[in-house]
Image: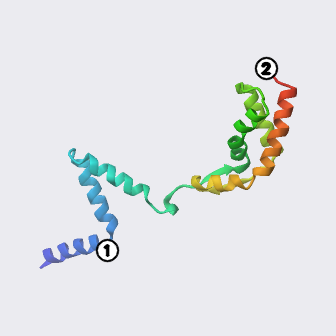
């Protein structure tokens, strides 16, 4: 009778804890070399985890906004496109803006960047004028 209880406990544990079943399935799939496609499916299932499992990152939204708009502004104002001038424009523009650090998911960075459109354009134009008048190359 004790064997039946042990089996019942194991079955109940598997029913209550779906993660145990998932772990067993992953171990079986990893051990079998024939089921490579199953491993890919498990990895794809893990990508669909809820957002609270995804890591949040510390982001300076002002910097991301400047980098996003920088190339377009440089082309429109016909500034030098060498590496040093691009970095100078970026540094000057970011320093003109007030820093805005947030802890968010990487997917949400674009939504925050949109809020800074007007300030970023002004800072970029001023930075490009400074670099055009005083290039360091």
Q: How many marks?
A: 2
Single out the residue that lies furthest toward the front: 76
Determine whether 62 is above or below 132 in the image. below
User: Is residue 112 visible to the viewer in this orientation of the structure?
Assistant: yes
Measured in 3D between alpha carbons, the distance from the residue under mark 2 to the one under mark 1, in whole angstroms, is 67 Å
Q: Which residue is mark 2?
A: 137
Q: Residue furthest left?
A: 1
* Dot 2: element: loop
Instruction: Please indicate whether residue 73 sits to the left or right of residue 29 in the image.
Output: right
Q: Which residue is mark 1?
A: 16
| Residue 41 image position (x, y, % from top left) | 32, 53
Q: What residue is drawn where x is 78% and y is 29%?
A: 79
Would you identify the image quadrant in which residue 76 lies?
top right
- SS for callout 1: helix
Position in image of residue 20 (x %, y %): 31, 64
Q: Quadrant of the C terminus?
A: top right
Residue lying at the far top in this picture: please name it.
Answer: 137
Please name whichever residue, 37 or 125, is drawn nearer the observer in this view of the structure.
125
Neighbourhood count class around disc 2 (C-alpha, 10 Å): few under 14, some 14–19, many 20 upward:
few
**Residue occupying the point 40% across, 56% down:** 46
| In-front residue for pair 117/33 | 117
Residue 84 placement, left or right of 18:
right
Could you tell me if residue 98 is visible in this image?
no
Answer with the quarter of the image where residue 112 lies. Answer: bottom right
Residue 43 numbered mark, or none? none
Residue 95 placement (x, y as % from top left):
81, 42
In the rendered image, residue 101, in percent from the top left (x then y), is placed at 71, 53
Tell which of 1 and 20 is nearer to you. 20
Which circle's residue, 2 or 1, is located before the other in the chain?
Answer: 1
In what quadrant of the picture does the N terminus appear?
A: bottom left
């Amino acid at each position: 009778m004790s064997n039946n209880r042990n089996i019942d406990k194991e079955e109940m544990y598997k029913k209550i804890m779906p993660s145990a079943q998932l772990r067993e399935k992953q171990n079986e799939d990893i051990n079998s070399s024939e089921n490579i496609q199953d491993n890919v499916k498990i990895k794809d299932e893990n990508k669909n985890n809820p957002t609270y499992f995804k890591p949040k990152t510390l982001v300076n939204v002002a910097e991301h906004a400047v980098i996003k708009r920088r190339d377009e502004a440089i082309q429109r104002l016909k500034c030098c496109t060498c590496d040093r001038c691009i970095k100078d424009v970026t540094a000057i523009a970011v320093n003109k803006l007030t820093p805005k650090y947030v802890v968010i998911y990487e997917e949400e960075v674009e939504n925050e960047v949109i809020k800074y459109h007007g300030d970023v354009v002004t800072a970029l134009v001023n930075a490009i004028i400074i670099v055009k008048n005083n290039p360091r190359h």
